[in-house]
Amino acid sequence: MISVKVDEQNIHIGDTVRVHSKVVEGTKSRVQIFEGILIRLRGRDVNKTFTVRKIGAGGIGIERTWPLDSNSIVKIEVKKKAGKVRRSKLYFLRGLTGKSAVRV
């Protein structure tokens, strides 16, 4: 299973994660939480990125990609561990709708 170590915890493909990222709007900054399924890890060393997918309002899928060593990421917490995942990239979730798009 593809995994990476972040803040003394391993995150694996298929885990449901909450990414706390810093958003700057004008002079103010706040922490925004993006919760979804980790569908992709790619790159090596400093260039490593990860993509999280969630189902937004109206059943529209939203994907967001961050560099793993980004300063805008405050923390990553694993909300639910994945079961048995047999793929390294979960792109097939893009074609699914409803509960099947959220379960791995």
Image: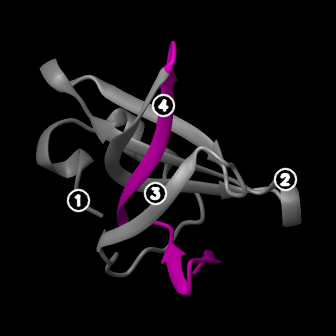
Q: Quadrant of residue 77?
A: bottom left
Q: Quadrant of residue 37?
A: bottom left
Quick one: 91 or 31, which is closer to the camera? 31
In the image, which is nearer the foreground, mark 2 or mark 3? Answer: 2
In the image, which is nearer the foreground, mark 4 or mark 2? Answer: 4
Q: In the visual, does 33 lie left or right of 50? A: left
Residue 47 is tagged as 2
Q: Amino acid at mark 1?
A: Arg
Residue 48 is tagged as none
Which residue does the numbered mark 4 point to in the structure image?
23
Q: Amino acid at mark 3?
A: Leu
Q: Quadrant of the C terminus?
A: bottom left
Residue at x 14% of width, y 19% of height = 58
Between the residue at mark 4 and the residue at mark 1, the CA separation in whole angstroms equals 29 Å
Q: Amino acid at mark 4?
A: Val
Which residue does the numbered mark 1 point to in the structure image?
103
Q: Secondary structure at mark 2?
A: helix
Quick one: 55 or 89, which is closer to the camera? 55
Between the residue at mark 2 and the residue at mark 1, the CA separation in whole angstroms equals 29 Å
14 inside magenta stretch? yes
Between the residue at mark 4 and the residue at mark 3, the CA separation in whole angstroms equals 21 Å
* Disc 2 crowd, CA 10 A, few/some/many (<14, 14-19, 20+): few
In the image, which is nearer the foreground, mark 4 or mark 3? Answer: 4
Which residue does the numbered mark 3 point to in the structure image?
38
Q: Quadrant of the N terminus?
A: bottom right
The stretch in magenta equals 1-27
Give the vertical position of 65 relative to 19 (above or below).
above
Residue 91 rendering spot, x and y as whole percentages: 50, 45
Quick one: 10 or 37, which is closer to the camera? 10
